[in-house]
Image: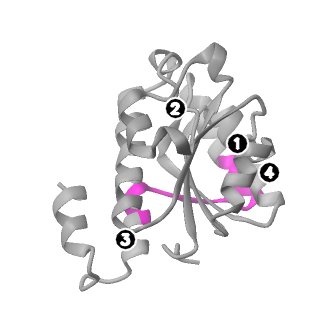
Amino acid sequence: MLLDKDKAIVAVIDVQARLLPGVHEHETLVKNCSWLVRLARLMDVPVIGSEQYPDGLGHTEESLRELVGPDKIHGKTFFACIDDPDFERAFQAHGRKQVVLCGMESQACVLQSTLKLLEKGMEVYVVADAISARNPFDTEVALRRMEQAGARMVTKEMVGFEWLRRSDAAEFKAFSKEFLR
């Protein structure tokens, strides 16, 4: 099943600046999450974000926070973002069934968000090159578990090409110039 930009929403999970230094390849994580958010903007796909206990753990990395929009990022204490009532209300308001997930940490909030979204009947696409954890082995096992549960594993470029579908799409020139170099 292909991703469809008219059915998709991007969820950026807990990419909080205070936690990043301990996360494996955190610069790549921020870069790839930002890439996805910029792509979503180009393709008119809604974006929503979460922050795990922001009062204690701080906010989303600043450049990513600005890209997502601070008003679209919801604080939570649940590990599964969709279990938070404010996040769920904002998420459901978009009426999208395909969820493109990126963020951290793979074995906690990304995994539990994926499993809960699947339980709610959503199609979940985990962007494997845009999730991470402190321990890379946690990411490896989380990816396997999410796939076994029914989530689809994708890369950021797979998302872009599936949303575009064809080289004569209106956004293809911008995609090729801004995202593939």
In space, the residues marked 4 and 1 are separated at their CA atoms by: 9 Å
Dominant secondary structure (helix, strand or loop) of the stretch shown in magenta: helix
In space, the residues marked 2 and 3 are separated at their CA atoms by: 25 Å
Tell me the tag on residue 164. Answer: none
Q: Position of residue 45 (x, y in %)?
A: 47, 65
**In the picture shown, does residue 46 fall above or below 23?**
below
Sequence order check: which comes first, mark 2 or mark 3? 2
Mark 1 residue element: helix
Q: Tell me if 53 is positioned left or right of 9 in this view.
A: right
Sequence order check: which comes first, mark 2 or mark 4? 2
In space, the residues marked 2 and 1 are separated at their CA atoms by: 14 Å
Q: Position of residue 109 (x, y in %)?
A: 69, 36
Q: Dot 2: few (<14), some (14–19), or many (≥20) neighbours within 10 Å?
A: many
Mark 2 residue element: loop
Residue found 70% across the figure and 42% down from its top = 111
Q: Dot 3: few (<14), some (14–19), or many (≥20) neighbours within 10 Å?
A: some
The type of residue carrying mark 4 is Lys
Mark 3 residue element: helix
Of circles 2 and 1, which is in front? 2
Q: Which residue is mark 3?
A: 161
Q: Which residue is mark 1?
A: 111
Q: Which residue is mark 4?
A: 116
**Snapshot quadrant of residue 117:** bottom right
Of circles 2 and 3, which is in front? 2
* Range drawn in magenta: 144-159
Q: Position of residue 24 (x, y in %)?
A: 47, 25
Q: Which residue is mark 2?
A: 15
**Camera-side residue of 79 and 23:** 79
The type of residue carrying mark 2 is Val
